Image (cartoon, rainbow, N blue to C red):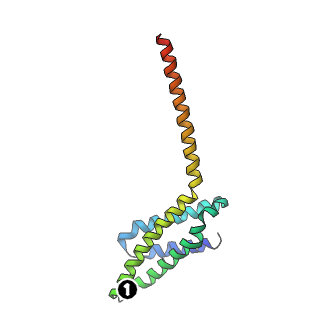
Amino acid sequence: MDEAKPKISRLHKALISIRHIPSLKQRMEFIRITRKIYILTKKEPKRFYKAERFYFSHLDSAVELAEKYVFLSLQPKKDRELENSLFETRRTLEELKTSIENDLYQVLSDDIDQLHFELDVAKHSIRKINESQLHEEGRRLK
């Protein structure tokens, strides 16, 4: 967790520095998701194990790609190869964002399962109440 905080800061700084307007919304979402994973695992360290892929793989890749993208995009003269590399990097960052979204869902998986359980219990209770009320109304009509 101690190593992750500066990496996340570097990632956010790099993503904000990218001057590609069409990908702005995607980059802001990327920042929001990484921040959410970090906050959740910091607040509840037991969630760290559900986010291992994020911390040990995806975060490092994202930082490296974003920083290299910023460096190369700031070069004054861009040839076809550089433009293609920048395009490919943006596409890869988008795929990486999807992977990090999956990491967030993995961190939240126990909460989602618990919510489904609570929903099932509530629906069962409502169904029982409705059946009971229908039964009572049927008795009164006789």
| Number of marks drawn | 1
In the rendered image, the residue lying farthest to the top is 142
The residue that label 1 is drawn on is 82
Percent coordinates x, y for residue 2 in the rendering: 65, 71
Helix, strand or loop at disc 1? helix
Left or right: residue 105 versus residue 27 is: right
Left or right: residue 79 versus residue 55 is: left
Percent coordinates x, y for residue 22 in the rendering: 35, 70
Q: Residue sitting at 46 percent across and 73 percent down?
A: 15
Percent coordinates x, y for residue 139 in the rendering: 50, 13
Pick the front one: 41 or 137: 137
Q: What is the three-letter code of the residue carrying label 1?
A: Leu
Q: Examine the rendered structure and indicate whether residue 68 appears above or below residue 121.
A: below
Q: Examine the rendered structure and indicate whether residue 2 appears above or below residue 106.
A: below
Pick the front one: 44 or 17: 44
Give the quarter of the figure containing the N terminus.
bottom right
Q: Examine the rendered structure and indicate whether residue 108 appears above or below residue 126.
A: below
Q: Residue sitting at 51 percent across and 30 percent down?
A: 127
Other-residue count near label 1 (Cα within 10 Å), few / some / many at <14 / 14–19 / ≥20: some
Percent coordinates x, y for residue 106 in the rendering: 56, 59
Q: Quadrant of residue 41?
A: bottom right
Q: Residue sitting at 38 percent across and 70 percent down?
A: 23
Q: Residue sitting at 37 percent across and 86 percent down?
A: 82
Pick the front one: 111 or 131: 131
Q: Quadrant of residue 94?
A: bottom left
